Image (cartoon, coloured by chain):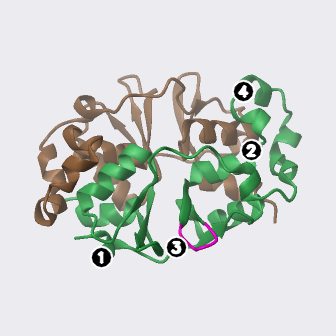
Chain colours: A brown, B green
Amino acid sequence: MRASDLVVPWPTVTMSTPALDTTRILADADLPGLIVVDEAGAPFAVLPGTQVLRLAVPSYYQDDPNLTHLVDEAAADVFMRELGGRTVRELLPPQPHELPVVGPEATALELAALMARTRSPLVAVVDGGRLLGAVTLHGLLDRVVPA
Amino acid sequence: MRASDLVVPWPTVTMSTPALDTTRILADADLPGLIVVDEAGAPFAVLPGTQVLRLAVPSYYQDDPNLTHLVDEAAADVFMRELGGRTVRELLPPQPHELPVVGPEATALELAALMARTRSPLVAVVDGGRLLGAVTLHGLLDRVVPA
């Protein structure tokens, strides 16, 4: 089996999508992550769910457990309000050296090793720069876990 | 809201669980990850789905895209056969410095920042060393994304 056998259509966002909308798309469709595309429609970033969430956590809280601990329960419940209208472009977390992106010929083993290495539960599939969709961790597991 | 309001029961595995069984549990229940508990039942590791998959990718393939590319499609389809009866103990990936584990009082913001920082879509909740269950990324998003 190849990536072309496992790929499914996948929602995309752009650099100008409000960050709050990305969390809504993720939550409403119960997705493991999202693909950020550039103006030509090619994948610019692949964001696992945790990194979509990272868009929504104010930067001064992201790496300081002591600071988050000082925020009271009522304010912590509404931390996403601090996002305002900021876009993906303004908040995109640092991208890994290796993007989880493959061509349609990638094998099950290549997909699995790439997901494990990049810690991404989805891999974008491109053909000649055009995004075909994504292969998900669970889509892959359903085919490779021995009965 | 606190972790105690968001926690749900979560399946656990131990260091002696066969690695293949962990991938089956993940696939069958469509989970974002698993918790590995020690002999006392406390969390020893929290494995996002990609790191459960990592248990199943032979180590010599994990970090070498060129090597995985040499494996033909038929062999790549059955890469998990190479696992044999190896256990979680034998295959556990390196653990991060910070485990995604909180007490029942952790706020929504603390949970979100921890998931973003550790790249884990689940956080184990413990009370006095006893595992209460897990808070998932989607369980959290459902409560914090503004309507």
* A109 relative to A44 in the view: left or right: right
Give SS at disc 2.
Answer: loop
Q: What chain is tagged by disc 1?
A: B
Q: What chain is tagged by disc 4?
A: B
Q: Quadrant of residue B29?
A: bottom right
Q: Report the quarter where the N terminus of chain B lies.
A: bottom left
Q: Residues within 10 Å of mark 1 (few under 14, many from 20)?
A: few
Between the residue at mark 2 and the residue at mark 3, the CA separation in whole angstroms equals 24 Å
Between the residue at mark 1 and the residue at mark 3, the CA separation in whole angstroms equals 15 Å
Q: Earlier in the sequence, mark 1 or mark 3?
A: 1
Between the residue at mark 4 and the residue at mark 1, the CA separation in whole angstroms equals 43 Å
* A124 relative to A69 in the view: left or right: right
Give SS at disc 4.
Answer: loop
Q: Hey, what amino acid is under mark 1?
A: Asp
Give SS at disc 1.
Answer: helix
Q: Hey, what amino acid is under mark 3?
A: Trp
> Mark 1 sits on what residue?
B5
> What main secondary structure does the magenta stretch of the protein show?
loop
Q: Residues within 10 Å of mark 2 (few under 14, many from 20)?
A: many
Where residue A4 sits: x, y (%)?
68, 39
Magenta-drawn segment: B38-42
**Which disc, if any, is residue B57?**
2
Q: Earlier in the sequence, mark 2 or mark 3?
A: 3
Q: Hey, what amino acid is under mark 4?
A: Asp
Q: Hey, what amino acid is under mark 2?
A: Val
> Mark 4 sits on what residue?
B64
> Mark 3 sits on what residue?
B10
Identify whether A84 is placed above or below B39: above
